[in-house]
């Protein structure tokens, strides 16, 4: 369409300036086997930029973002239109931004890695404990 322009790749340093001009971010992913297990990193990036997000029903967008009232999920083209209109007419934008900031405050790669390492440690401890118990029982 004549109103759509492909701007090419942009550096990470340039992205905040682009996001600042957006009213809404759309993530219209196709729902199929290729997108069944994706976890779009765009979601927290757009939210961190203060941009409302409308997405198709991707599981990792629904939970936790939609469940926490941070994004709008569209199931049809009409839903996307309604979601965009809702976001453009949002009355409590400052409250929404505060909710987004509070949610994202602890959402970092470092925190995610720490949580994953803790779960790995817990599983290793369980495995080691069960091995020790089996050996102990073998000698009884």
Image (cartoon, rainbow, N blue to C red):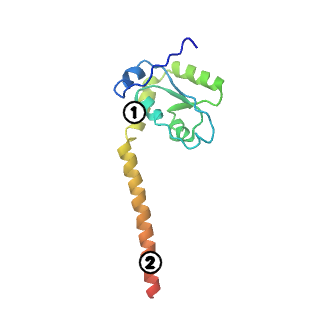
Q: Which residue is mark 1?
A: 101
Q: Which residue ends up furthest to the bottom in the rendered image?
A: 140
Q: Sort mark 2 into few (<14), some (14-19) or many (20+) by Cα contacts within 10 Å.
A: few
Q: Which residue is mark 2?
A: 133
The one nearer the camera, 106 or 56, is: 56
> The residue tagged with tag 2: helix, strand or loop?
helix
- Residue 93 in the image: state x and y as whole percent: 45, 23
Image vertical order of residue 33 relative to residue 6, above or below: below
Task: Give the mark nearest the N terminus, 1 or 2.
Answer: 1
In screen coordinates, is 86 left or right of 95? right
Image vertical order of residue 43 relative to residue 3, above or below: below
Name which residue lies at 37% across and 46% down: 111
Asked if residue 89 shows in the view, the reply is: no
Name which residue lies at 51% across and 28% down: 53
Name which residue lies at 34% across and 26% down: 13
For the C terminus, the quadrant is bottom left
Q: Quadrant of residue 15?
A: top left
For the N terminus, the quadrant is top right
Closest to the camera, between mark 1 and mark 2, is 2
- Residue 116 in the image: state x and y as whole percent: 41, 52
Callout 1–callout 2 Cβ contact below 8 Å? no
The one nearer the camera, 11 or 83, is: 11
């Amino acid at each position: 369409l004549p109103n759509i322009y492909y701007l090419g790749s942009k550096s990470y340093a340039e992205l905040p300036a682009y996001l600042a001009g957006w009213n809404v971010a759309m993530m219209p992913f196709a729902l199929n086997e290729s997108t069944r297990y994706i976890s779009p990193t765009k979601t927290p990036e757009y939210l961190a930029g203060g941009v409302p997000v409308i997405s198709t029903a991707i599981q990792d967008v629904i939970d936790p973002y939609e469940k926490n009232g941070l994004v709008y999920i569209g199931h049809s083209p009409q839903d996307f239109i309604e979601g965009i209109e809702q976001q453009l007419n949002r009355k409590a934008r400052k409250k929404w931004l505060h909710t987004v900031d509070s949610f994202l405050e602890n959402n970092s790669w470092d925190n995610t890695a720490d949580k994953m390492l803790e779960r790995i440690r817990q599983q290793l401890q369980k495995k080691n404990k069960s091995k020790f118990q089996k050996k102990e029982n073998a000698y009884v």
